[in-house]
């Protein structure tokens, strides 16, 4: 019975796949730490491994919590055409206009992020190290997701245009292939964000505006590449995995003119900036005194639970 439930869950969630991939999320949280001011680095740098590892907790939670999925995206195309003026940016107004069910079924990413930012700010005020780190890691995840163009489209995995797999291609395969070799993550400093909601919607609109190119260029390249040149096969963990070939991935990246790198850089800056903003809005509490507080037993337990659910589910649906 349990297995059956998990299998169904896995099928449901594989619709909105993994977000930036684990590699991308970990890299974004990790690099964001280096953009922080020294007062924050005092706590964040010694805990950089935690922030990196827990960058993917919200994706693991999808295997346990039904409401988790819609927090990672918003199908903007459901609300007309760019710049989607008919969709109120404030949650209370959007819910009044469309109702909670519609919002849930088309994703609540931008609004959920505001809730997370509020909770992170409160954790800073309380000087609660466990909550600061946990909420910072997860706020980083939700912020990063909204920088992925296909997280703002109902055609999130190319399922309406015969481009199945494009989601992971853009956000996992391309960064995994190129980020370390070619991309520059030297970004500068976190900046204070006076109005996080407006800032969030600006990033969402950038993502939505990029969706057409993401889909169109893959289609154009597919016409140029023979099937056996588009994909390659790799032996991984005792299984043969079909993936987009290096040649196809590089050609796609060139055609996108560095879009994936640009969005990843923007995500790093946004994550660092929202951490910084939450800390400033909490009154810039002293974090040095928190460095030696231990991670709580409850948090360790929750992490084990998430991990166990994710590992079980990923063997069922084939996610790495
Ligand atoms: Zn996600």
Image: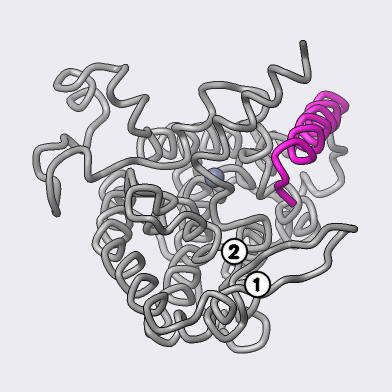
Q: Residue at x 32, y 59 (%)?
A: 207
The residues tagged by marks 1 and 2 sit, at their Cα atoms, a distance apart of 6 Å
Q: Is residue 44 above or below residue 304?
A: below
**Viewer-proximal residue among 309 and 268:** 309
Locate residue 104: give its quadrant.
top left
Mark 1–mark 2 CB contact (< 8 Å): yes
Give left or right: position of 62 versus 269.
Answer: right
Q: Quadrant of the N terminus?
A: top right
Q: Residues within 10 Å of mark 2 (few under 14, many from 20)?
A: many
Q: What's the magenta region?
A: 296-320
Query: What residue is drawn where x is 60% and y is 89%?
Result: 182
Camera-nearest residue between 26 and 269: 26
Mark seen at residue 172: 2
Q: Residue 49's spot in the image, x, y percent?
A: 80, 57
Kindly identify which residue carries mark 1: 176
Residue 279 at x, y percent in the picture: 53, 48
Res. 203 image quadrant = bottom left
């Amino acid at each position: 019975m349990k297995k059956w439930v998990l299998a169904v869950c896995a099928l449901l969630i594989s619709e909105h796949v993994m977000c930036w991939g684990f590699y991308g999320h970990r890299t974004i949280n990790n690099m964001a730490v280096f953009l922080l001011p020294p007062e924050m680095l005092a706590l964040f740098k010694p805990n950089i491994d935690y922030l990196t590892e827990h960058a993917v907790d919200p994706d693991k939670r999808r295997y346990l919590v039904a409401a988790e999925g819609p927090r990672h995206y918003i199908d903007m195309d459901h609300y007309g055409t760019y710049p989607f003026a008919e969709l109120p940016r404030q949650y209370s107004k959007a819910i009044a206009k469309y109702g909670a069910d519609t919002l849930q079924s088309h994703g609540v990413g931008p609004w959920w992020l505001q809730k997370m930012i509020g909770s992170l700010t409160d954790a800073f005020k309380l000087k609660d190290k466990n909550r600061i780190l946990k909420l910072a890691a997860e706020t980083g995840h939700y912020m990063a997701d909204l920088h992925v163009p296909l997280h703002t489209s109902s055609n999130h995995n190319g399922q309406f245009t015969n481009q199945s797999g494009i989601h992971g291609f853009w956000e996992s395969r391309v960064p995994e292939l190129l980020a370390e070799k070619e991309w520059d993550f030297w970004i500068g400093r976190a900046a204070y964000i006076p109005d996080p909601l407006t800032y969030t919607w600006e990033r969402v609109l950038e993502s939505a505006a990029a969706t057409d190119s993401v889909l169109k260029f893959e289609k154009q390249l597919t016409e140029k590449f023979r099937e056996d040149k588009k994909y390659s096969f790799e032996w991984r963990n005792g299984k043969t995995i079909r993936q987009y070939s290096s040649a196809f991935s590089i050609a796609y990246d060139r055609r996108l003119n560095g879009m994936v790198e640009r969005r990843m850089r923007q995500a790093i800056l946004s994550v660092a900036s929202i951490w910084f903003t939450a800390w400033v809005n909490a009154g810039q509490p002293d974090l040095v005194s928190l460095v030696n507080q231990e991670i709580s037993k409850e948090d360790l337990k929750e992490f084990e639970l998430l991990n166990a659910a994710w590992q079980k589910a990923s063997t069922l649906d084939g996610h790495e």
